[in-house]
Image (cartoon, rainbow, N blue to C red):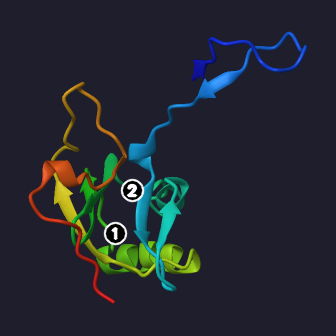
Amino acid sequence: MRLATEPSGSSLPFARINGIQGRTEDILHLPAVSGGEVAVHPITFHHVLDSLPVSGWQVIQENDGLRVLLSGAMNGTNDAKLVDAIAGNLITQHVLAPRISVEHVAVIPKNATGKAPLIKAYNPSCSQKAPIWMN
């Protein structure tokens, strides 16, 4: 949060907020069924992935879909049902469901600061390809 340095136009003694920086990398922007984009919040994935018998998970938005990483998956993790559940949650938000793949990994990769974010939005500057969405 960034407070405004100039006084407000009112006589109220409260500070004004000039801007809020959020974790925009946690919000995925996916194509909408009717055109445009839908902002998909992390809770969409938490509803499905938090109940899995795994030690960790991560959703990575790529230029052609979503990749779900699972670490420490116990017996009984059904990848096809997981993909269907995620796609179903996205469809209820009017998202044109992208390709979703599940990958089992030993550990969830960490970023440069040593954290393992749960959601990683697509960053075109990290890739030479532009996002491709198929209708």
The reply to whether the C-beta atoms of the residues labelled 2 and 1 are less than 8 Å apart is yes
* Image point (81%, 14%), residue name: 14
Taking the image as shown, residue 21 lies to the left or right of residue 14, namely: left
Q: Which residue is mark 2?
A: 53
Please provide percent x and percent y for residue 47.
54, 60
Q: Which residue is mark 1?
A: 76
* Image point (24%, 68%), residue name: 102
Residue 1 has which mark? none
Which of the pair 65/74 is nearer the observer? 65
Quadrant where the image shows the C terminus: bottom left
Q: Secondary structure at mark 1?
A: loop
Q: Amino acid at mark 1?
A: Gly
Taking the image as shown, residue 72 lies to the left or right of residue 128, namely: right
Residue 117 found in image quarter:
top left
Q: Is residue 83 above or below residue 129?
A: below
Q: Residue furthest bottom?
A: 135
Neighbour tally class for label 1: few under 14, some 14-19, many 20 plus, Cα within 10 Å? few
Neighbour tally class for label 2: few under 14, some 14-19, many 20 plus, Cα within 10 Å? some
Which of the pair 96/119 is nearer the observer? 96
Quadrant where the image shows the N terminus: top right
* Image point (12%, 55%), residue name: 127
Taking the image as shown, residue 119 lies to the left or right of residue 91, namely: left
